[in-house]
Image (tube, grey):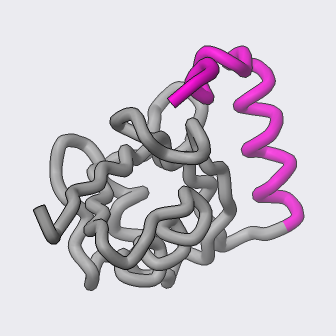
C-alpha cells in the first residue's frame, strides 16, 4: 500500500470538480473510491463511476480484478463501518454513506486468506 490516499492526493476542490464533471456526463451514476485498507494490494485505491443499480457482489468482483486479488483470498468491502452486502445497491449505499464534502462514496477493501 504505497502512496497517498485519494483524499491526500487530490484537493477538495479537485475532487468536487471531478465528481460534478463525471455526473454531467453520466447522470444516474455514483462516483466511488475504494481504498486498500491494508498492505499487500497492487494498488492504493480504485476510482470508478458505477450505475446506481450495481450491486455489492458486482462491485466485489470488479475490485477483485482491479486490486489483483487471487481466488485463494476473500475480499470484504467496508462502507461507513459496515460490510457491504452482496444485495446492496450503489443507490442504497450512496444514500447512507456518501461523503458530505466532496460527494464521493468511499469504501475500504480488506482481504483474508481463506486457506490459512
Q: Nearer the viewer, residue 78 or 63?
A: 63
Q: Residue at x 46, y 32 (%)?
A: 100
Q: Residue at x 27, y 60 (%)?
A: 76
Task: Say if 93 sits above or below 50 in the image.
Answer: above
In the rendered image, residue 45, in percent from the top left (x then y), is placed at 58, 42
Q: Main secondary structure of the magenta part?
A: helix
Q: Is residue 64 left or right of residue 110?
A: right
Q: Residue at x 86, y 48 (%)?
A: 21
Quadrant of res 5: top right
Task: Say if 49 sits above or below 80 in the image.
Answer: below
In the rendered image, residue 11, in percent from the top left (x then y), is placed at 72, 15
Task: Say if 61 sits above or below 98 in the image.
Answer: below
Numbered range of the magenta stretch: 1-25
Q: Nearer the viewer, residue 19 or 49?
A: 49
Reply yes or no: does residue 21 show up in magenta: yes
Q: Residue at x 36, y 82 (%)?
A: 57
Quadrant of res 15: top right
Image quadrant holding the C terminus, namely: bottom left
Task: Determine the residue located farthest toward the left in the rendered image.
Answer: 116
Task: Say if 19 sits above or below 6 in the image.
Answer: below
Q: How many marks?
A: 0
Q: Is residue 13 left or right of residue 108?
A: right
Amino acid at each position: 500500500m504505497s502512496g497517498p490516499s485519494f483524499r491526500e492526493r487530490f484537493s477538495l476542490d479537485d475532487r468536487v470538480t471531478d465528481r460534478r464533471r463525471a455526473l454531467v456526463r453520466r447522470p444516474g451514476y455514483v462516483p466511488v473510491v475504494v481504498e486498500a485498507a491494508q498492505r499487500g494490494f497492487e494498488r492504493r485505491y480504485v476510482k470508478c463511476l458505477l450505475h446506481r443499480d450495481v450491486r455489492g457482489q458486482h462491485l466485489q468482483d470488479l475490485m477483485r480484478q482491479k486490486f489483483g486479488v487471487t481466488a485463494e483470498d476473500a475480499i470484504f468491502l467496508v462502507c461507513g463501518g459496515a460490510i457491504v452486502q452482496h444485495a446492496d445497491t450503489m443507490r442504497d449505499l450512496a444514500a447512507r454513506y456518501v461523503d458530505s464534502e466532496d460527494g464521493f462514496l468511499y469504501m475500504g477493501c480488506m482481504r483474508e486468506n481463506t486457506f490459512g
